[in-house]
Image (cartoon, grey):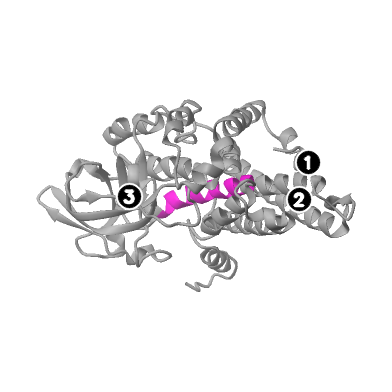
Amino acid sequence: MSSSLDQLSLLSDQLTEEERLLRSATRRFVAERYLPHAGEWYEAERFPRELISEIAELGLLGANLEGYGCAGMSAVSYGLVLQELEYGDSGLRSFVSVQGSLAMYAIHAFGSEAQKQRYLPELAAGRAIGCFGLTEPDSGSDPGSMKTRARRDGSDFVLSGSKMWITNAPFADLAVVWAKVDDGDADSIQGFVVERGMPGFETPRTHGKMSLRSSETGEIVLEDCRVSADHVLPGRRGLAGPLSCLNQARFGIAWGALGAAKACFDCALDYTKARVQFSVPIAEKQLVQAELADMASEIVKAELLALHYGRLKDRLGKLAPAMVSLCKRNNVGMALDCARRCRALLGANGILLEYPVIRHMLNLESVYTYEGTHEIHTLVLGKALTGLNAF
């Protein structure tokens, strides 16, 4: 990662020694183990599962959680780690985000002590993989309209329904699934831990994606899947549970998107300094310098915003949902715009997997949409500002 942007923000000078060490270790892992194969994995629609044990050894799974084998990183440290992972690829960051900020966080926040002891050490060590089942084919931005049901049968529950666009689902050992219990009222939404091998639990893979190709995405299909009472997450009922998990993931995404933007910027900067047209490097042209200056300004502002909110989160223990929406909306929108502009600076070469820009650009089209679309976060901010609900 080039030092050009850091010279404009002096971000490194604002970090603790521990934060810098964590960032450096993750950066080295991405540079040595992921980036040399990033293009081929993307083209092959393959997530490198062979790297999971190394990711776990770095303490990156459930990194911001306390206890149960988790690293207990600060919010800023965790954000810096996710930024480095997404410098490699959004699919790499998505794997870590879903494992930690969604599946593990849900169990950590809402699980019983027995569930925490049973699942979290295995997930932190990468010996078990988790996914998070909330989104449905007809229930995306409106999760309260979910159709997945949990019917009581004695002390057990029988789950029926389907979830869609579930990261890690094809190879997950367990899924945190949200369903409506009995009466179908929104307040009856409950979380369940469903394990691989339970009858009626299937996770077919989604093929043909043109974005996030290095992330394994699938469905969760539940056909009268019976789970015992000890698989119910007892800590929270209603939509507040899954939405609080999403808030954790969105904060990480706001950091991760910075990594994608920086990867595109670094590539464009190097390319324009080396690409000679009309006898001079195109970086010498005013229009090219204007593009680079605009992007650098936006990246630096977005990173300082993430750092500010990260410090607040560490001090307060949480952020208001509107703050997280603002950061996710701003930083992902900025990163997608930068990726598109960098693609243009590379000209025809910008569409080649030899360069990271097109890969990041296509990935960011998904990041712009998931964990709350850009438009939904706009309405969250609108409600926070006006007090009026436009949903």
- Is any part of residue 110 visible from this angle? no
Q: Is residue 372 above or below residue 50?
A: below
Q: Which residue is mark 2?
A: 296
User: At numbered mark 2, what does the secondary structure look like: helix, strand or loop?
Assistant: helix
Question: What x and y, as percent, mark residue 210?
Answer: 49, 57
Left or right: residue 316 versus residue 198 is: right
Left or right: residue 359 versus residue 213 is: right
Q: Nearer the viewer, residue 312 or 254?
A: 254
Question: What x and y, as percent, mark residue 278?
Answer: 88, 56
Q: Which residue is mark 1?
A: 4
Query: Which residue appears at 76% of the width and 50% of the height?
Result: 296
Q: Amino acid at mark 3?
A: Arg
**Disc 3 or 2, which lies upstream in sequence?**
3
Question: What x and y, as percent, mark residue 341?
Answer: 70, 58
- Is any part of residue 95 visible from this angle? yes
Q: Amino acid at mark 2?
A: Ala
Q: Amino acid at mark 1?
A: Ser
